[in-house]
Image: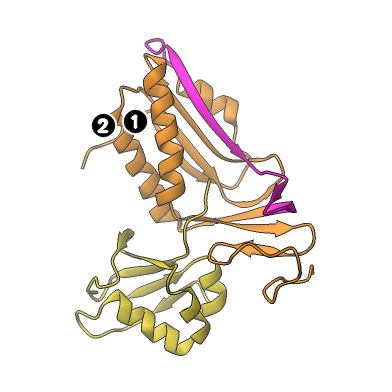
Amino acid sequence: MTVLFFGRLKDVAGHAADSAEVADAATIEQLFALYMARYPELAKYRSSVVASRNQEFAAWDTPLRSGDEVAFLPPVSGG
Amino acid sequence: MATLPHDDVYQLIREPIDVAALARLVRAPEDGAVVTFDGFVRNQSHNRATLYLDYEAYESMALAKMREIGIQIHGKYRVHRVAMVHRLGRLEIGETSVFIAVSAPHRAAAFDACRFAIDTLKRTVPIWKKENFADGAVCADVELPPAPAATPRAKPAS
């Protein structure tokens, strides 16, 4: 699946897009935990980050399927 | 899923927003009112002088969310056309970052819809601004505003 990072999260993860494989029915929470293990600084943003799955906002316990596009989004600040 | 009128405009652009053209575009002979919202870059924020802003978006999702707002507007209010344009990239003080124009036969619906549009955009459309201050500090999305004194995250100007 494709994993996207935006805003400050992109700087912390060092890239805007990554390709990941997770076990079937793994959740968005588990996917983010994988990245927190790789980039420990991500942990301090966990409480403010919002996730999307296939371009819809998604709860952290949403199960994932291969081919999904998951994005980790800072609180939006457009306008 | 409901569809949008073909005359509506939902765009993310990297050039200056032509606000007069958009306000004209939504007008039609059967309308009696156009309400617009022009959001532009303020010269200060968090008690600091701002130099410029950088906007980025999750573009495909942002456009989908903007169209969703349009569908909600047409379902909730008696309006005719909606134009909603957000600019991305570097914006200088005074430049328009977001512009919304709504036409309607009568003003009340146009005012209500325009207010709903900007309020909902600010909550649901994945766009982020990074504020670059005159003193070199940078404030982006998940970070707290920089304190007046130097903070560990405040970066020197480069």
Is B29 part of what is drawn in magenta? yes
Q: Amino acid at mark 1?
A: His
Query: Of helix, strand and loop, which mostly describes the magenta segment?
Result: strand
Q: Earlier in the sequence, mark 2 or mark 1?
A: 1
- The colour with which the image depicts chain B is orange
Q: What is the x, y in percent for residue A69?
A: 33, 68
| Chain the render paints yellow | A
Q: Residue at x 37, y 14 (%)?
A: B105
Q: Amino acid at mark 2?
A: Gly
Name the quadrant of the N terminus of chain A.
Answer: bottom left
Depth check: give the residue in front, B9 or B124: B124
Q: Which mark is residue B75?
A: 2
User: What range is drawn magenta here?
Assistant: B28-52
Whole-number angstrom distance, CA of label 2 to CA of label 1? 15 Å
Q: Which mark is residue B6?
A: 1
Q: What is the x, y in percent for residue B26?
A: 45, 23
Q: What is the x, y in percent for residue B6?
A: 34, 30
